[in-house]
Image: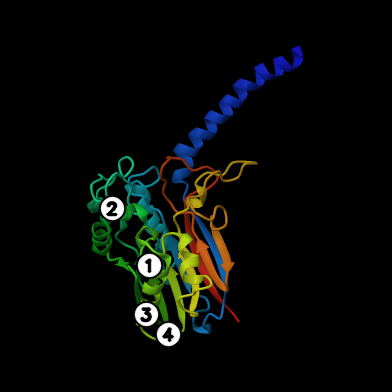
Amino acid sequence: MRSLTRTIVYAFPVLAVLASLCIAYSYFIEPDHLVVNSHELKIKDLSKEFDGLKIVAVSDIHGGSRGGEVEKIQRIVKTVNEQNPDIIVLLGDFVSEKGEPVKIGEQPLLMDLETLSSALTGFRAKYGTYAVLGNHDYWHSDSAVANALERAKIVVLENEIIGLNINGVTLRILGLKDHMHIKSQDRYNAEVRKVVENSVPGKDIVILQHSPDVFPIVAGTNKVSNDIRLFLAGHTHGGQVWLPILGTPMIPSSYGQKYARGHIRENDVDMFVTTGTGTSLLPFRFMMPPEIAVLTLRSSN
Protein backbone atom coordinates (compact mmCIF):
# COMPACT_ATOMS: atom_id res chain seq x y z
CA MET A 1 0.00 0.00 0.00
CA ARG A 2 2.81 2.37 0.91
CA SER A 3 4.53 1.56 -2.39
CA LEU A 4 1.35 2.35 -4.34
CA THR A 5 0.95 5.65 -2.51
CA ARG A 6 4.56 6.57 -3.27
CA THR A 7 4.03 5.73 -6.97
CA ILE A 8 0.95 7.95 -7.13
CA VAL A 9 2.76 10.79 -5.40
CA TYR A 10 5.66 10.61 -7.89
CA ALA A 11 3.43 10.04 -10.94
CA PHE A 12 1.10 12.97 -10.34
CA PRO A 13 3.62 15.78 -11.02
CA VAL A 14 4.92 13.91 -14.07
CA LEU A 15 1.39 13.66 -15.48
CA ALA A 16 0.74 17.30 -14.64
CA VAL A 17 3.87 18.35 -16.55
CA LEU A 18 2.90 16.19 -19.55
CA ALA A 19 -0.60 17.64 -19.56
CA SER A 20 0.81 21.18 -19.43
CA LEU A 21 3.18 20.43 -22.31
CA CYS A 22 0.31 19.03 -24.39
CA ILE A 23 -1.83 22.10 -23.73
CA ALA A 24 1.06 24.41 -24.61
CA TYR A 25 1.74 22.45 -27.82
CA SER A 26 -1.94 22.50 -28.80
CA TYR A 27 -2.11 26.28 -28.38
CA PHE A 28 1.29 27.61 -29.44
CA ILE A 29 2.48 25.10 -32.04
CA GLU A 30 -0.10 22.94 -33.79
CA PRO A 31 -2.50 25.73 -34.87
CA ASP A 32 0.40 27.16 -36.91
CA HIS A 33 1.61 23.79 -38.21
CA LEU A 34 0.04 23.93 -41.66
CA VAL A 35 0.12 20.61 -43.51
CA VAL A 36 -0.61 19.68 -47.11
CA ASN A 37 -2.50 16.39 -47.42
CA SER A 38 -2.70 14.92 -50.91
CA HIS A 39 -5.39 12.43 -51.94
CA GLU A 40 -6.30 10.64 -55.15
CA LEU A 41 -10.06 10.24 -55.34
CA LYS A 42 -11.43 7.57 -57.66
CA ILE A 43 -14.76 9.03 -58.77
CA LYS A 44 -17.35 6.72 -60.28
CA ASP A 45 -18.59 7.81 -63.72
CA LEU A 46 -16.38 10.90 -63.77
CA SER A 47 -15.85 12.04 -67.36
CA LYS A 48 -12.43 10.98 -68.59
CA GLU A 49 -11.69 14.59 -69.57
CA PHE A 50 -11.46 15.42 -65.85
CA ASP A 51 -9.10 12.59 -64.98
CA GLY A 52 -6.13 14.15 -63.20
CA LEU A 53 -7.96 17.39 -62.36
CA LYS A 54 -6.45 18.91 -59.21
CA ILE A 55 -8.77 20.64 -56.75
CA VAL A 56 -7.26 22.30 -53.69
CA ALA A 57 -9.71 22.69 -50.79
CA VAL A 58 -9.44 25.03 -47.81
CA SER A 59 -12.04 25.58 -45.12
CA ASP A 60 -12.66 27.26 -41.77
CA ILE A 61 -10.03 29.98 -41.95
CA HIS A 62 -11.73 31.84 -39.06
CA GLY A 63 -9.86 35.11 -39.48
CA GLY A 64 -8.52 36.46 -36.20
CA SER A 65 -8.83 33.15 -34.36
CA ARG A 66 -5.87 31.20 -33.01
CA GLY A 67 -4.34 29.92 -36.22
CA GLY A 68 -6.26 32.48 -38.26
CA GLU A 69 -3.81 35.37 -38.07
CA VAL A 70 -2.99 37.50 -41.13
CA GLU A 71 0.43 35.88 -41.57
CA LYS A 72 -1.14 32.40 -41.43
CA ILE A 73 -3.79 33.30 -44.03
CA GLN A 74 -1.11 34.72 -46.32
CA ARG A 75 0.86 31.50 -45.88
CA ILE A 76 -2.26 29.51 -46.81
CA VAL A 77 -2.59 31.51 -50.04
CA LYS A 78 1.08 30.98 -50.87
CA THR A 79 1.01 27.25 -50.05
CA VAL A 80 -2.18 26.67 -52.05
CA ASN A 81 -0.64 28.38 -55.10
CA GLU A 82 2.46 26.21 -54.77
CA GLN A 83 0.29 23.13 -55.38
CA ASN A 84 -0.35 24.35 -58.96
CA PRO A 85 -4.13 23.86 -58.62
CA ASP A 86 -6.60 23.60 -61.46
CA ILE A 87 -9.41 24.77 -59.17
CA ILE A 88 -9.33 26.29 -55.68
CA VAL A 89 -12.38 25.88 -53.44
CA LEU A 90 -12.90 27.73 -50.15
CA LEU A 91 -15.56 26.08 -48.02
CA GLY A 92 -16.81 28.69 -45.59
CA ASP A 93 -16.34 30.16 -42.11
CA PHE A 94 -13.99 32.95 -43.08
CA VAL A 95 -14.73 35.01 -39.95
CA SER A 96 -14.84 34.61 -36.18
CA GLU A 97 -16.81 36.70 -33.70
CA LYS A 98 -15.68 38.27 -30.46
CA GLY A 99 -17.64 36.00 -28.13
CA GLU A 100 -20.70 33.95 -29.00
CA PRO A 101 -23.00 35.43 -31.67
CA VAL A 102 -26.04 37.03 -30.08
CA LYS A 103 -27.78 38.60 -33.07
CA ILE A 104 -27.03 38.26 -36.75
CA GLY A 105 -25.00 41.17 -38.07
CA GLU A 106 -24.32 42.80 -34.71
CA GLN A 107 -21.36 40.85 -33.38
CA PRO A 108 -17.91 42.43 -33.82
CA LEU A 109 -15.27 40.34 -35.55
CA LEU A 110 -11.82 39.24 -34.44
CA MET A 111 -10.51 40.37 -37.84
CA ASP A 112 -12.14 43.15 -39.82
CA LEU A 113 -13.27 42.32 -43.34
CA GLU A 114 -10.87 44.70 -45.08
CA THR A 115 -7.91 42.97 -43.43
CA LEU A 116 -9.38 39.55 -44.25
CA SER A 117 -9.96 40.51 -47.88
CA SER A 118 -6.39 41.76 -48.25
CA ALA A 119 -4.94 38.61 -46.67
CA LEU A 120 -6.99 36.38 -49.00
CA THR A 121 -5.93 38.21 -52.16
CA GLY A 122 -3.64 36.34 -54.51
CA PHE A 123 -5.07 32.86 -55.05
CA ARG A 124 -4.13 31.53 -58.49
CA ALA A 125 -5.74 28.56 -60.23
CA LYS A 126 -6.11 27.58 -63.87
CA TYR A 127 -9.92 27.54 -63.76
CA GLY A 128 -10.53 29.95 -60.90
CA THR A 129 -11.18 30.22 -57.16
CA TYR A 130 -14.69 29.56 -55.80
CA ALA A 131 -16.18 29.94 -52.34
CA VAL A 132 -19.26 29.17 -50.30
CA LEU A 133 -20.15 30.69 -46.95
CA GLY A 134 -20.41 29.05 -43.53
CA ASN A 135 -22.42 29.44 -40.35
CA HIS A 136 -20.06 32.02 -38.81
CA ASP A 137 -20.28 34.07 -42.00
CA TYR A 138 -24.08 33.83 -41.76
CA TRP A 139 -24.08 34.95 -38.12
CA HIS A 140 -22.11 38.06 -39.07
CA SER A 141 -23.50 38.90 -42.52
CA ASP A 142 -23.47 36.73 -45.64
CA SER A 143 -23.51 39.76 -47.91
CA ALA A 144 -20.67 41.56 -46.10
CA VAL A 145 -18.44 38.47 -46.12
CA ALA A 146 -19.28 37.73 -49.77
CA ASN A 147 -18.35 41.30 -50.73
CA ALA A 148 -15.01 40.96 -48.92
CA LEU A 149 -14.25 37.74 -50.81
CA GLU A 150 -15.24 39.23 -54.13
CA ARG A 151 -12.85 42.14 -53.51
CA ALA A 152 -10.16 39.44 -53.24
CA LYS A 153 -11.20 38.14 -56.71
CA ILE A 154 -12.91 35.07 -55.26
CA VAL A 155 -16.19 33.94 -56.87
CA VAL A 156 -18.86 33.34 -54.23
CA LEU A 157 -21.62 30.85 -55.09
CA GLU A 158 -24.85 30.89 -53.07
CA ASN A 159 -27.18 28.27 -54.52
CA GLU A 160 -25.56 29.02 -57.84
CA ILE A 161 -23.89 26.90 -60.47
CA ILE A 162 -21.08 27.79 -62.84
CA GLY A 163 -19.85 25.81 -65.84
CA LEU A 164 -16.12 25.39 -66.50
CA ASN A 165 -14.91 24.34 -69.93
CA ILE A 166 -12.19 21.77 -69.23
CA ASN A 167 -10.72 19.86 -72.16
CA GLY A 168 -13.83 20.67 -74.19
CA VAL A 169 -16.28 19.31 -71.60
CA THR A 170 -18.32 21.28 -69.04
CA LEU A 171 -17.69 20.67 -65.34
CA ARG A 172 -20.43 22.23 -63.22
CA ILE A 173 -19.46 23.72 -59.86
CA LEU A 174 -22.51 24.05 -57.61
CA GLY A 175 -22.07 26.24 -54.54
CA LEU A 176 -24.75 25.86 -51.87
CA LYS A 177 -25.98 28.16 -49.13
CA ASP A 178 -24.94 27.10 -45.65
CA HIS A 179 -27.03 24.72 -43.55
CA MET A 180 -28.15 27.67 -41.38
CA HIS A 181 -30.44 28.65 -44.27
CA ILE A 182 -32.31 25.34 -44.18
CA LYS A 183 -35.81 25.72 -42.75
CA SER A 184 -37.17 22.63 -44.47
CA GLN A 185 -35.07 19.85 -45.94
CA ASP A 186 -37.65 19.19 -48.68
CA ARG A 187 -37.77 22.87 -49.63
CA TYR A 188 -33.98 23.11 -49.68
CA ASN A 189 -33.78 20.02 -51.87
CA ALA A 190 -36.35 21.51 -54.26
CA GLU A 191 -34.48 24.83 -54.45
CA VAL A 192 -31.19 23.12 -55.27
CA ARG A 193 -32.87 20.82 -57.77
CA LYS A 194 -34.26 23.87 -59.57
CA VAL A 195 -30.80 25.46 -59.71
CA VAL A 196 -29.42 22.29 -61.32
CA GLU A 197 -32.29 21.99 -63.79
CA ASN A 198 -31.81 25.60 -64.93
CA SER A 199 -28.02 25.34 -65.20
CA VAL A 200 -25.75 25.09 -68.20
CA PRO A 201 -25.75 21.57 -69.67
CA GLY A 202 -23.06 19.18 -68.54
CA LYS A 203 -22.58 15.68 -67.22
CA ASP A 204 -20.60 16.16 -64.01
CA ILE A 205 -21.34 18.23 -60.89
CA VAL A 206 -19.02 19.07 -57.98
CA ILE A 207 -20.91 20.45 -54.98
CA LEU A 208 -19.38 22.95 -52.56
CA GLN A 209 -21.07 23.21 -49.15
CA HIS A 210 -19.82 24.25 -45.74
CA SER A 211 -21.42 21.46 -43.72
CA PRO A 212 -21.26 17.74 -44.57
CA ASP A 213 -24.66 17.33 -42.88
CA VAL A 214 -26.25 18.69 -46.07
CA PHE A 215 -24.94 15.69 -48.02
CA PRO A 216 -27.94 13.40 -47.29
CA ILE A 217 -30.37 16.21 -48.19
CA VAL A 218 -29.06 16.76 -51.73
CA ALA A 219 -27.07 13.59 -52.47
CA GLY A 220 -28.95 10.96 -50.46
CA THR A 221 -31.87 8.84 -51.62
CA ASN A 222 -33.63 11.97 -52.94
CA LYS A 223 -30.67 13.09 -55.02
CA VAL A 224 -31.08 16.47 -56.72
CA SER A 225 -29.25 15.06 -59.75
CA ASN A 226 -27.67 11.84 -60.88
CA ASP A 227 -24.80 13.93 -62.24
CA ILE A 228 -23.33 14.62 -58.77
CA ARG A 229 -19.81 13.22 -58.70
CA LEU A 230 -18.22 14.89 -55.67
CA PHE A 231 -19.39 16.79 -52.58
CA LEU A 232 -16.81 18.94 -50.78
CA ALA A 233 -17.30 20.26 -47.24
CA GLY A 234 -15.56 21.51 -44.10
CA HIS A 235 -17.16 22.73 -40.84
CA THR A 236 -16.17 19.84 -38.57
CA HIS A 237 -12.50 20.84 -38.10
CA GLY A 238 -12.05 17.06 -37.80
CA GLY A 239 -13.08 17.63 -34.19
CA GLN A 240 -10.03 19.92 -33.79
CA VAL A 241 -8.67 17.67 -31.01
CA TRP A 242 -7.76 13.98 -31.15
CA LEU A 243 -6.91 12.18 -27.89
CA PRO A 244 -5.28 8.77 -27.46
CA ILE A 245 -7.83 6.07 -26.56
CA LEU A 246 -10.69 8.60 -26.50
CA GLY A 247 -10.31 9.69 -30.12
CA THR A 248 -12.17 12.86 -31.11
CA PRO A 249 -14.46 13.89 -28.24
CA MET A 250 -16.74 16.25 -30.19
CA ILE A 251 -17.76 16.63 -33.83
CA PRO A 252 -20.14 19.48 -34.76
CA SER A 253 -22.32 17.19 -36.85
CA SER A 254 -25.68 15.51 -36.37
CA TYR A 255 -24.03 12.35 -37.71
CA GLY A 256 -21.28 12.11 -35.10
CA GLN A 257 -18.05 10.61 -36.42
CA LYS A 258 -19.61 9.50 -39.73
CA TYR A 259 -18.78 12.70 -41.61
CA ALA A 260 -15.92 13.90 -39.41
CA ARG A 261 -13.18 14.11 -42.03
CA GLY A 262 -11.64 12.60 -45.12
CA HIS A 263 -13.01 10.65 -48.07
CA ILE A 264 -16.48 9.14 -47.67
CA ARG A 265 -18.50 7.26 -50.30
CA GLU A 266 -22.23 6.97 -49.84
CA ASN A 267 -25.17 6.42 -52.18
CA ASP A 268 -22.76 6.20 -55.13
CA VAL A 269 -21.48 9.73 -54.47
CA ASP A 270 -18.04 10.68 -53.14
CA MET A 271 -17.61 13.26 -50.41
CA PHE A 272 -14.46 14.78 -48.97
CA VAL A 273 -14.50 16.69 -45.67
CA THR A 274 -11.43 18.78 -44.96
CA THR A 275 -10.39 19.48 -41.36
CA GLY A 276 -9.89 23.22 -42.01
CA THR A 277 -7.14 25.61 -41.03
CA GLY A 278 -8.40 27.77 -38.14
CA THR A 279 -9.93 27.21 -34.72
CA SER A 280 -13.34 27.86 -33.24
CA LEU A 281 -14.80 27.74 -29.71
CA LEU A 282 -11.48 26.59 -28.22
CA PRO A 283 -8.13 28.00 -29.46
CA PHE A 284 -6.49 24.57 -29.61
CA ARG A 285 -5.59 21.90 -32.13
CA PHE A 286 -4.16 18.61 -30.97
CA MET A 287 -3.22 15.80 -33.37
CA MET A 288 -5.51 17.45 -35.93
CA PRO A 289 -3.28 20.03 -37.65
CA PRO A 290 -4.52 22.74 -40.04
CA GLU A 291 -4.98 21.16 -43.45
CA ILE A 292 -4.77 22.15 -47.08
CA ALA A 293 -6.37 19.27 -48.98
CA VAL A 294 -5.02 18.57 -52.48
CA LEU A 295 -7.52 16.35 -54.31
CA THR A 296 -6.58 14.74 -57.60
CA LEU A 297 -9.63 13.31 -59.34
CA ARG A 298 -9.45 9.97 -61.12
CA SER A 299 -12.14 8.57 -63.39
CA SER A 300 -13.37 5.16 -62.23
CA ASN A 301 -15.98 3.52 -64.43
Q: Earlier in the sequence, mark 2 or mark 3?
A: 2
Amino acid on which disc 2 is placed: Leu
- Mark 1 → mark 2, Cα distance in angstroms: 22 Å
- The C terminus, quarter of image: bottom right
Q: Would you name the residue on which mark 2 appears?
A: 116
Q: Earlier in the sequence, mark 4 or mark 2?
A: 2
Point out the frontmost of discs 2 and 3: 3
| Tag 4 and tag 3, C-beta contact below 8 Å | yes
Amino acid on which disc 4 is placed: Gly
| Residue 290 in picture, x, y percent from top left | 47, 50
- Mark 3 → mark 1, Cα distance in angstroms: 15 Å
Q: Would you name the residue on which mark 1 appears?
A: 176
| Residue 269 in picture, x, y percent from top left | 54, 72
Q: Residue at x 60, y 21 (%)?
A: 13
Q: Would you name the residue on which mark 3 appears?
A: 163
Q: Earlier in the sequence, mark 3 or mark 1?
A: 3
Q: Earlier in the sequence, mark 1 or mark 4?
A: 1
Residue 249, compared with residue 296, is above or below; it is above
Q: Would you name the residue on which mark 4 appears?
A: 202
- Mark 4 → mark 3, Cα distance in angstroms: 8 Å
